[in-house]
Amino acid sequence: MSRHSPAGFFSNRTITELADQLRAGETSAVELTRAALHAIEQFDSELNAFVTVDREGAVQAAEKADAELAEGQDRGPLHGIPVAVKDIIEVAGLPTTMGSAHFADHVSTSDAECVHRLRAGGAVLVGKTTTHEFAFGPTGDSAHNGPSRNPHDPTRITGGSSGGSGAAVAAGMVPLALGTDTGGSVRIPAALCGVVGFKPAYGAIPTGGVFPLSQSLDHVGVLARTPQDCRTGYRVLAGLRDAPSRERGDIANIGWIDPNSLHPTDPEVTRIARAALETSGIPVQDLGIRDPEVVHRGFLGIQYSEAYANHAERVADNPELFTDDVLGRLRESARTAGWQHVRALAARDRWRSDVDELLSGVDLLAMPTTCVVATEIDRREITVDGADVNVRGALIGLTKPWNLAGSPAVSILAGAIGGLPVGLQLIGRPGAEDVLLAAATRISG
Amino acid sequence: MSRHSPAGFFSNRTITELADQLRAGETSAVELTRAALHAIEQFDSELNAFVTVDREGAVQAAEKADAELAEGQDRGPLHGIPVAVKDIIEVAGLPTTMGSAHFADHVSTSDAECVHRLRAGGAVLVGKTTTHEFAFGPTGDSAHNGPSRNPHDPTRITGGSSGGSGAAVAAGMVPLALGTDTGGSVRIPAALCGVVGFKPAYGAIPTGGVFPLSQSLDHVGVLARTPQDCRTGYRVLAGLRDAPSRERGDIANIGWIDPNSLHPTDPEVTRIARAALETSGIPVQDLGIRDPEVVHRGFLGIQYSEAYANHAERVADNPELFTDDVLGRLRESARTAGWQHVRALAARDRWRSDVDELLSGVDLLAMPTTCVVATEIDRREITVDGADVNVRGALIGLTKPWNLAGSPAVSILAGAIGGLPVGLQLIGRPGAEDVLLAAATRISG
């Protein structure tokens, strides 16, 4: 977006193009991997997208990928493609810090299931990307290895928690990165960094070997430059390689949800997102959220209860090893009562019915991805449309509903405000991920 | 059991016998109903088994049942049989107090689904039975209408929470009564009053119209004199009338679980229960509980969280309307944290695997129903086998595991200590209720 953004090798190449060039002998996995490593060298001292770069392992994997292709062994669309993996996902032989001092010395002994699928699909893992500590924060600026920085303005956040993955794709260091999304952690950095971020339906990509934040809300997702590239990555991760979809995005209409019905939103963000949607020519229908409190209560009650269940012993034994940001949130989480968790689970069920109803008359739903563009690093309060709100709420207010519902959702680039990207979010039905991504391609134009 | 126990009309008649007599013209529904009302008049001023007796409605329903049978309309095995219903189950037109001052003036406007099925099956509803307030207590001695009293010794508890149903069947006031069982509330009064109490698998009988205590653990069940009579009631309530089972209790072996692995148990109770089992001649195999803490944590975390979610506004607005017993338990419930509820749900899943494993080599499991015989009314502490424990724990310690697992379970009469009944509990597999009840019949011998 902004004129001075870092532009690595992958800034203007799609995975589909690279795959064709690999098979035509116009490039090699080793060449692509060296291009990725070069871009990381060029830009990462400023952006801090990576915690760990595995130069040696990546080149070896690339050599193997080239040898396989030469022998006629084609592992599919990710064969020989450099990929980055969020640092809460286990990759055998590499450190997995979870963005936390608690795991500063942790080296993974096995691959997460999603990483296993990437490798089986021939992808070349170049390194691990910066995550908000334990993925518990949407700003991406609170991690043991420091904040990831927005390629469009390094004084600003990438968004999180998959912030390193967002910066790595946005700066053209890799064409594809893995993220996780519990309240928006794939879609938010995608929106703030100006790339595409996609989470399929809950459970579509296995979470084994991914450090849990909130098991009922955690999704594995992907960040890439285009919806089509996200689709390529998603299908490998979801084990759908051999079953091309017949559904192809004949979208009759899209329901627009007023973002202010969920959270105060910058009117300029709303205008840009809506305009991007309308440019597609797809008929848009205005919809409202009947009871937004159901979303807030359901999401917080579940996320807080599950997050603290995952961290209670660490908080009790070694609180000093947490960042203040995450420790504060965990202490707040501990105060959620069991009966509130019970009501949160009931609220989730009600919200899922509401979403079914919202989707009963339209093919997709749309709204901005975030309520604001990227804020300054470490900023925690902000004024939006005259309301004083916390940055966290302004970032996850429009994404978290779709974690609670388990709906597939994608963020695409809608435009920019002062050089800072604005995301448009599209939400679909579980199982109809291809329809959603086809529409995203059409709207991306 | 004890020589001086009240013995109403139904003390020595099974439902099967009564059904035959009805169809042979040897008795009538009106005659059976008047016998029930007479026994209630005789004994209930002492036992307090009933909150509400619907003399007029019962006689009318009986007249209708007789007219139908005369016209050849036979509604099945409960046609014309008097039945009592626990007072947390809605019966249209009658008060449903939930055993609480909060609902002292509440008159139900519709039938619970289980009551609807009873009526559709031709049963004659004679009244509502005493329940521990909101079914939240296994003693049965804390209710707006006072404690129900044990027919074997009116200074002692019936057990609860379906205490009135236990006393009503034990005293021969009705041949069948409905109860609910969240941690043992059908099986405990059955054991302490010397009758049979059966809860089928979780969900087998619908809970619509039953005031919830803890939705994940609540079961509707039945109390009667014999396992066969429980089976008759259960099949009507579960909507299984027209599908007689082919499974008929070819029990190869039974696993005995040492009750002390779950809770300190009176050795004499254990001896009597085990002896009753062995008299049947079925081979018995000794089994142990691997991690009883999983049961305790899982059960309490879920029950407390759900119970408080059902009562939070009442505790906040009108605490004075609760009995001290239940208010104290609710205040304790409120202190369960959300993360503990999350871990309780995980513990439940582990326990269910453990139960599958326990049942992998045997057809049924067996153990005493309670750790002690009926205690004095209002007593809250007791010494069992040298350990000081609370009465609540000694009553539910052996029954609650099967609510957490959702397993079908039945309590039958094993013997007595000083005139006070001892229960033997048998536990089966969901869906194999008929196997369980056939074995219960064989062991009751």
Image (cartoon, coloured by chain):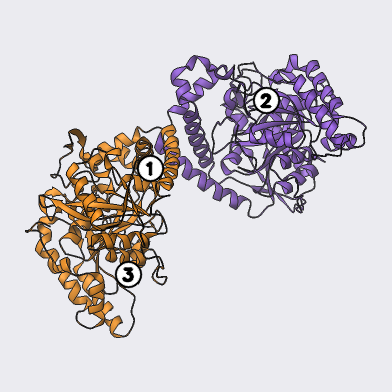
Chain colours: A orange, B purple
Chain bearing mark 3: A
Amino acid type at mark 1:
Glu
- Quadrant including the N terminus of chain B: top right
Query: Residue A306 — which label?
Result: 1
Residue drawn at 69 percent across, 49 percent down: B432
Q: A9 or B230, which is in the foreground?
A: A9
Say if B363 sits above or below B143 in the image: below
Query: Residue B163 — which label?
Result: 2
Spot occupied by residue A344 in the image (x, y as percentages of width and height): 41, 37
Position of B291 with respect to B143 (left or right) is left
Q: Mark 3 or mark 1, which has the lower sequence index?
A: 3
Alpha carbon separation for disc pair 1 and 2: 38 Å
Spot occupied by residue A316 in the image (x, y as percentages of width and height): 32, 37
Q: Can marks 2 and 3 be said to lie on one chain?
A: no
Q: Label 1's element?
A: helix
Alpha carbon separation for disc pair 2 and 3: 62 Å
Chain bearing mark 2: B
Q: Which residue is mark 3?
A: A119
Amino acid type at mark 3:
Arg
Chain bearing mark 1: A
Say if A157 sits above or below A176 in the image: above
- Residue B279 in view (yes/no): no
Position of A420 with respect to A107 (left or right) is left
Query: Residue B96 — which label?
Result: none
Alpha carbon separation for disc pair 3 and 1: 30 Å
Q: Can marks 1 and 2 be said to lie on one chain?
A: no
Position of B134 with respect to A4 (left or right) is right
Looking at the rendered structure, the number of numbered marks drawn on it comes to 3
Residue drawn at 29 percent across, 71 percent down: A78
Q: Label 3's element?
A: helix
Q: Label 2's element?
A: helix
Q: Can marks 3 and 1 be said to lie on one chain?
A: yes
